[in-house]
Amino acid sequence: MQLTPLTMLANILNALLVADSFWNAGLRGFLVPWTACVMVVALFGARVWFVMRTRRRRHTASLRALRRAAIHASILGTLWALVPVVLFPIANSQQQLMITAISAGMICAGGFALATIPAAAAAYVLILSAGSAYPLLSTSDPVLANVGWLLYIYAIIVVASVIATARTFGARLMAESRAEHQTQVIGLLLRDFEENASDVLWEIDRQGSLLHVSPRLAQMLDKSLDDLAGTIFVDHLRNPAADWGEAERDCLRELESRIGGNEPFRDLTIPILVAAERRWWSLSAKPLTDPDGQFSGWRGVATDVTHARRAHERITHLAHHDTLTGVANRHQFHTLVRSALLAVADNASSCAVACIDLDNFKDVNDSLGHQAGDSLLQIVAQRLSAGTRRNDLVARLGGDEFGLLLREPGNNSELEGFVARLLEQLQRPCELYGSRTSVGASVGIALAPRDGTDATTLLRNADIALYAAKAKGRGSFCFFDPAMALGSQRRQMLERELQRAMDEGGLSLFYQPQIVLATGAVWRFEALLRWKHPLHGNIPPAEFIPIAESSGLIVRLGEWVMQKACQDAAGWPDSIGIAVNLSPAQIVGRDLCRMVDAALTESGLPTSRLEVEITESVFLNETGETLGQLHSLHRTGVKLALDDFGTGYASLAYLRRLPFDTLKIDRSFVHEMLESTEARAIVRSVVDLAATLKIATVAEGVETRKHIDALTAEGCTLGQGNHLGEPMPAANVLGFLERLAHAAAPAG
Ligand code: C2E
Ligand code: MG
Ligand code: MG
């Protein structure tokens, strides 16, 4: 179409030239209508071009249009073929030359001009060459005949070239059309991608400067398009905040090394500070090369993954931290202890774990409620975190148990000092829902590698040390000692077995008489628990009572002892009392009076015949409540005895704090009396003081006649011991009393 005006102009000019050349040779009857026809056809073609020119550019051609073009070309071809057919026979040799030149030129030019419409070109070329060759072949001149054949060969070559050109042209057109379509689709997709996805495209040149910055990228970086144009992309990412840790800086280093090393990367997550807020981007990119294979920059995608990252961080935090206190949880503690132990092995260093158990958490929970209990746990977690170093780890292992991982524990005395200070800080009183409470704790410590090289062993050993610390008394700490481990296994076994013994009646009470030294009469019996294990034999109360105390079994056990003792004693003569041992754990947080009253009512034993024995340990961790309960119990008429006096602090001041009726001097004093005058003096002053306070004294561990004599000499009137009467089963008590009466009768 584009060539139409030119080719039509050529047609008109050629036609005029031919008319002019042959005007004088006659045949004007042919020349005039022929020239007119050529002009009409040429003008028609030019008109079609003119009309089409103003219309929208078309990318397709209809079959009809192609057919019309072919017809148009055939008409032109025929018109030009008439020139040699009609004029050649009458032409002189110059005119023949001209006809040959015009025919050859029209064949070639027309063929090329129509090359994009092969049908039109072929029709035109073949008709014109056939017309041109005809007069040549019909002369008798062999040279002219050869020229005719030459024309045919031309025609064939021109048609073949036209077809080949048309094919290439068609293929190019198709390819262009496809490429254009693809460009449109890609453009559409990219726009859609930039507008809707959370991803943004970025491209940088060889120097790292941003190319074609999209509005979304500017928005993601909180910058204007102008601010970004031509700036170095990585500079916008390389703005770490002061509080970023090594992990964050590592991400940036990784990005820089990938870009520096021309390595493509995928989903590389990096932190980025945008408008003073830490966000996370995921970057994927690959290096670009120009057509010569030279590195020309980078193209990639950036996605803001902050939301996903935060959700992930939150989930990780929840999985590794205790929700109530915010410190690490047991799982995290184990994990970090494990990695600390790896570091210990690698660096030949050491670390320590501490298990911390609150002493009176249950009381707080019971008396002030669970909310107060929760607050207390939070306070403890805060105090532990405040009291430890940044490098250390505080964890809540469950309930009221906390764990510490000390990565640089220092030497033993430093560690001891640290734990003592920590306990002191923990014990500071705190306000809980209006009441002032103080919380004590016991701590067990195990050191790596000495006490264990794997987390399980180390933590178990710290736990064993914690048990030992608890046994020592509240507010104390213990380092693990291998001897404890053996004990702890037996301890676990005993705890299980004790529970079973309680359920299956494997426990019994023995009674040991307390005797009036002057007369040998029974004053009262002390109830002593006995446990005969079917496999392990007799297990001494000194071993299983502490286990019952720490496991809480003592409450049920103590209640049973109280009931059984009262029941047995109710069957004895009225004058004989019964002494029952009471653990501090039985007093705290329980309704002691109700428990005792129930036992008395059920057995029918008069209150005045019952005495409870408590040890000095009651005073060590006493809360006002403990003493209050004992006071109340005493007011109901139950007597109070201070047991084992002299084993603890042996402070006579304790005697003033509770209205004791009896003081039991520990057997260690009694035994020493025989050798040491000092011990004797102590016993004497204790007895004297007790007498002034109207408190009876019972000497324990009377094993020989000599003990009786010495005690009597120092003013002690009552005694208990194997020499006076060994602990006996309930069934033997009446027989014992009878024998005693018999023995006393003759003398009396
Ligand atoms: P305790 O209350 O001081 O009991 C006296 C202990 O001295 C008893 O030990 C008794 O068997 C022992 N004993 C008696 N006479 C002699 C003697 O002449 N020489 C020596 N060396 N020992 C003598 P047992 O029965 O082994 O009880 C030990 C401790 O266990 C008791 O000391 C008491 O604190 C505790 N216990 C026993 N039964 C109970 C109980 O039912 N409840 C509670 N909470 N504690 C109990
Ligand atoms: Mg006792
Ligand atoms: Mg005792």
Image (cartoon, rainbow, N blue to C red):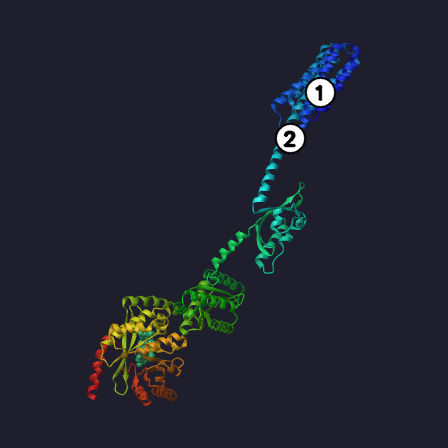
User: Which residue is identified by label 1?
Assistant: 43
Say how many tags the image has: 2
Task: Name above or below for residue 116 compared with residue 354.
Answer: above
Left or right? Give the position of 76 relative to 271. Answer: right
Q: Nearer the viewer, mark 2 or mark 1?
A: 1
Task: Name above or below for residue 174 compared with residue 125.
Answer: below
User: Can residue 454 be spotted in the picture?
Assistant: no
Residue 37 in the image: state x and y as whole percent. 71, 15
Mark 1 Cβ and ligand 1 under 8 Å apart: no
The residue tagged with tag 2: helix, strand or loop? Answer: helix
Left or right? Give the position of 664 relative to 136. Answer: left
Numbered mark located on residue 413 in the image: none
Picture quadrant where residue 135 is located: top right
User: If the image is split into quadrants, where does the C terminus sit?
Assistant: bottom left
Task: Compare marks 2 and 1 and give the one earlier in the sequence.
Answer: 1
User: Crowdedness of circle 2 by 10 Å Cα count: few (<14), some, many (20+)?
Assistant: few
Q: Amino acid at mark 2?
A: Arg
User: Which residue is identified by label 2?
Assistant: 172
Residue at the far bottom in the pictured view: 713
Picture quadrant where residue 572 is located: bottom left
> Do the CB atoms of the residues marked 2 and 1 lie less than 8 Å apart?
no
Task: Name above or below for residue 75 compared with residue 422.
Answer: above
Residue 110 in the image: state x and y as whole percent. 70, 21
